[in-house]
Amino acid sequence: MKIKQVIRNSQKNSGFVLIESIVSMVIILMAFDLMVLSLDAVRRPENYQQVTFYRCVSLIEGEKFSFKVDGISNDELKMSSPKTHKKYRLMKYKDNVILTGYENGYVPLIERVSAIRFWRKYKQINFEVRYQNGETYHAKIISGSG
């Protein structure tokens, strides 16, 4: 009789250990997921959107491409580069501002954008980006015009 009780007790305990270990693994995975999300938030600087906006402006004004403005509309800036002998467009695609060639491919420059706007005032080109969180940045682009 005692042998049967010992066997039953050992069977109950092994089942409990299995369930306990599964629950423990789920808790550990949830904690790991939380840690990864918090590290992602820490990696981005507080002024991330401002930094990406001015990186985009510096790319347009920089010597790497030496962009010349070919055309401007409310939501697109057409440019050409004498260094690469190619034509480019700066425009909004989905929720990104992208730099694209007329043939293939694009490079996302700014993300989480709700609207962009280009306009010419006197001989300056103005560039404004409104982010999804409501922040807005504006720059006067210094570039050759054609």
Image (tube, rainbow, N blue to C red):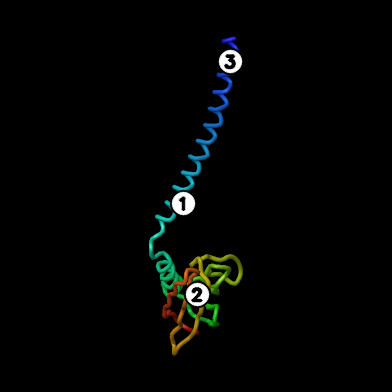
Distance (Cα) linking label 3 and label 2: 82 Å
| Residue on which the image places disc 2 | 81
The type of residue carrying mark 2 is: Ser
Dot 2: what SS? strand
Q: Secondary structure at mark 1?
A: helix
Of residue 61 and residue 46, the one placed in the foreground of this image is 46
Mark 1 → mark 2, Cα distance in angstroms? 40 Å
Query: Do tag 1 and tag 2 residues touch (Cβ < 8 Å)?
Result: no
Q: Nearer the viewer, residue 75 or 60?
A: 75
Which comes sooner in the sequence, label 1 or label 2? 1
Type of amino acid under label 1: Leu
- CA gap between label 3 and label 1 equals 46 Å
First along the sequence among labels 3 and 2 = 3
| Quarter of the image where one finds residue 123 | bottom left
Q: Position of residue 38 (x, y in %)?
A: 43, 52
Q: Which residue is mark 3?
A: 7
Question: Disc 3 or 1, which lies upstream in sequence?
Answer: 3
Check disc 3 and report its element: helix, strand or loop. helix
Is 61 placed above or below 38 here?
below
* Label 3 environment density (alpha carbons within 10 Å; few <14, some 14–19, many ≥20): few
Q: Which numbered mark, 3 or 2, is in the foreground of this view?
A: 3
Amino acid type at image mark 3: Ile
